[in-house]
Amino acid sequence: MGESVAEATLTAWLKDVGERIEVDEAVLEIATDKVDSEVPSEVEGVLIEKLFDVNAVLEVGQTIAIIETESDVPESFSQIPETLITEPEAAVQLETSIEKVKETIAASSPIGSNGSRFYSPLVKNIAKKEGISQSELDAIQGSGKEGRVTKDDVLSYLSNKSQTSSVGSEAPQTSANPLSPRVSISPSSDTVNLVISQGEDEIIEMSRMGKLVSKHMTDSIQTSAHVQSFIEVDVTKIWNWRLGIKEAFKAREGQNITFTPIFLEAVAHALTVHPMLNISVQDGKILKRKNINIGMATALEDGNLIVPVIKNADQLNLIGMTKRVNDLAHRARTNNLKPDDIQDGTYTVTNVGGFGSIMGTPIINQPQVGILALGAIRKVPAVIETNEGDFIGIRQRMFLSHSYDHRVVNGALGGQFIKTVKEYLEAWDENRSL
């Protein structure tokens, strides 16, 4: 699924136990970083076991299903002495041996996350070493963030196994009155948060993508020191230029040219001028990115955002940039993006002007250190400076809002970056041909 993908959510099984599977036939669907993908089988055979349920979080490298093939006869069975098969007493021993093998396989099945509950590799290793089953682990009450089971929880369970088992088997009582307030308790290491819902309130379950976006945004705020710089840009030349060429471009290329690829071209140029914004922070070190891969935040019909990535944006001409933007935007809205389409971004651009906002303070898309928000283009009165003097005129203008990580990007660099973008856009050649 790509080097940057560590886990995925199992969203659907496409095959049932006992069904035959062909090579390259899809067995299940997973979701990774908001993109749904099918997982095909690498072998031909029969599905004999599913190791995870729907909504389980799977780590890359885990075994998720067992497929029986014609070559699945264990080598140890082929070496059984002939007398063991022909003699009745030996046949009983063989059945016992097979049962022991099955028990060993069941005991060695990997501990996995259950539904919305995530277990860290450390917790899984302790559970495996101490022989804690999946059901036992699921019964342990977690004291970590969002109710996660911590190392201390597992060690406490081991030392008080009998008491913990009895506690874990108790089911919470619910009120018989359907109109009474409902209380949701979120366990935490320090405090307990109570969310009380009255009878007239509507409870809406967050979608999978909504939960992912929520966590991603919260993690970013907790990771980066966000600071913003703003600048106003006169895009009258670009407005008039696009107005003059868009019909001919559509007739020749079969698609529209929007303002987005123009702005992305300017951002790619600014990143070549200021490469220290094309970086990531990892383990106290700065990782300077060789490629300029610009993420393009795209709104979906359900209100969520997804960020497909334009790889090597600085190497594309405006026609190539336009076709790439249109292709990614279309596939994002039709849910046809592949995992690789949203990976390896080094900087992000989001268009808040599409919703009528003149500016915004976007949250950095980790592990990047900067994101640029494009405000709405507005027709406004402005002071125009000429050699003959200043005068008031009607111009097309917009605001650029730049959020950057103040841990590694100071105010001077953050301001110089959007100034470079502004200068590139305002110096647009109105006679430029495509």
Image (spheres, helix red, strand yellow):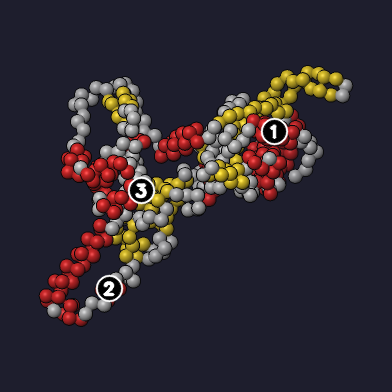
259 or 409, nearer to the observer = 409
Q: Position of residue 405 (x, y in %)?
A: 57, 35
Q: For the residue carrying disc 2, how many other residues have a C-alpha within 10 Å: few (<14), some (14-19), or many (20+)?
A: few
- The residue pinned by badge 3 equals 122
Q: Which of marks 2 and 1 precedes in the sequence?
A: 2
> What is the x, y in percent for residue 393?
77, 20
Residue beneath the point at 78% across and 40% down: 432
The reply to whether dot 3 and dot 2 touch (C-beta < 8 Å) is no
Q: Is residue 383 left or right of residue 150?
A: right
CA gap between label 1 and label 2 equals 69 Å
Does residue 90 appear left or right of residue 128 in this picture? left
Q: Which residue is mark 1?
A: 416
The residue depicted at 58 percent of the width and 38 percent of the height is 369
Could you say where residue 357 lies in the image, as x and y percent from the top left?
59, 25
Element type where label 3 sits in the image: helix
State whether residue 43 appears in this view. Answer: yes
Relative vertical location of residue 277 with respect to residue 290 in this rendering, above or below: above
Residue at image x 50%, y 49%? 4
Identify the secondary structure beneath mark 1: helix
* Residue 18 seen in render: no
- Kindly indicate the quadrant of the structure image that contains residue 129: bottom left
